[in-house]
Amino acid sequence: MGPTLKKKVLLTGANGFLGKCLASELIKYGIDLIKTTRQESLDSSACNLASEYEVATLINKFCPDLVVHCAAFVPKTIKEYEGERLSFRNKIMLKNILNATKVPIIYISSMTVYGLSKKIIRHELDAGVPESSYGISKYESELLLKEDGRDALSIRIPGLFGQDRGDGIVVNTIRSLCNNEQPNFPKSPILWATMDVEDAAKIIAKLSIKINFNGYMPINVGYSGVYSINKFLSICEGIFKKTIEYKVVHPEFEFDLTLLRGFNAVSTNNLKTALIKLKEKY
C-alpha cells in the first residue's frame, strides 16, 4: 500500500479542535491544502456545509482531488448526544459533499458507531448498534458513503483531548489533580475511550496521504490496549501518586487495530505518555 500523490486536498472543519491539528499535519506533506471553516479568514474559505448551494460553489471553485471531511456537530454534554435535530446535520453536510463531487472522501467518524456489546475488542465489522443519536448519525453517514460506491474511508476515532480543549473527562481530571482538587466523574457506567488530538491528527494525515483507495473501508484509529474510565483513573493514580476514590465500574473497550497496523500507522505513543505530556502543560 504505497503512497499516492494528492494534488489538492479540501479539509472541512479546519478551525475545529481536530481540524487545526490535522491541517498542520497535512501541510507537512507538501500538499495544496484548501481549508474551509464557518467564518472566512486569511487562509480559509467560509462555507455552510448544510447549504447544498454553498458546498457546490466551493467544490466548483477549488476542484479538490480529495476531501477530508472533519467538520461535524460534536456534542459537549450527554443531552446533546441525544439531540436528533442537531446530529441530523451531520448527515446533511455529508450528503451535500457527496452530491457536489465524485472524488475520494475521508470521513472522520466515531467509536460511538459501536455502542454497547459483550465484546471488548471491536473489529470494524462490529459496528451497527449505536445507542446515541450522535452515534446513529455517524453510522448512517458511514452507510451513505458505502452506498455511494466511491472510494472512501471512514476513520473511527475515540474522544479526543488536549490542552486546547477546556473541558472533558481527561482535561478536567488532570487539571483537578494538578490543583489538588477532587475530580468529577460519570455517576453511571459509560463506554469510553480517548486519544490525544495531536496523535490522532498524525495518524489521520498519514492515512490521507498513504492510502491507495479501493472502494469503501472503515478503519479504527486509537491507542493500543484496553480503555475504560477505571483504567484511565488507574493511570492517573500512578502519574500523580495519589489514590482516587471512585466506585462506579465502567465497561472496557479496545480497538482492533489490525487494519491500522497494515498501513504502519499505529501511534508510537500510548495513553500514559499522552497524559504525562498533558500534565506537564498545567
Image (tube, helix red, strand yellow):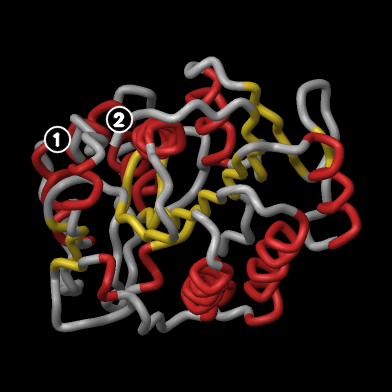
Which quadrant is home to the C terminus? top left
Which quadrant is home to the N terminus? top left
State the residue in front, 256 or 218. 218
Amino acid type, mark 1: Ile
The residue shown at (14%, 67%) is: 121
Q: Residues within 10 Å of mark 1 (few under 14, many from 20)?
A: some
The residue shown at (50%, 74%) is: 143
Vertical position of residue 206 compared to residue 134: above or below: above
Vertical position of residue 121 compared to residue 6: above or below: below
Q: Position of residue 189 (x, y in %)?
A: 26, 77
Tell me the SS state at disc 2. Answer: helix
Q: Which residue carries the number 2 mark?
A: 279
Residue 73: mark in rendering: none
Vertical position of residue 89 compared to residue 49: above or below: below
Whether pointer 1 and pointer 2 mark residues with C-beta atoms closer than 8 Å, the reply is: yes
Q: Decide if residue 78 is in sight here.
A: no
Q: Which residue carries the number 1 mark?
A: 239
Amino acid type, mark 2: Lys
The residue shown at (24%, 46%) is: 260
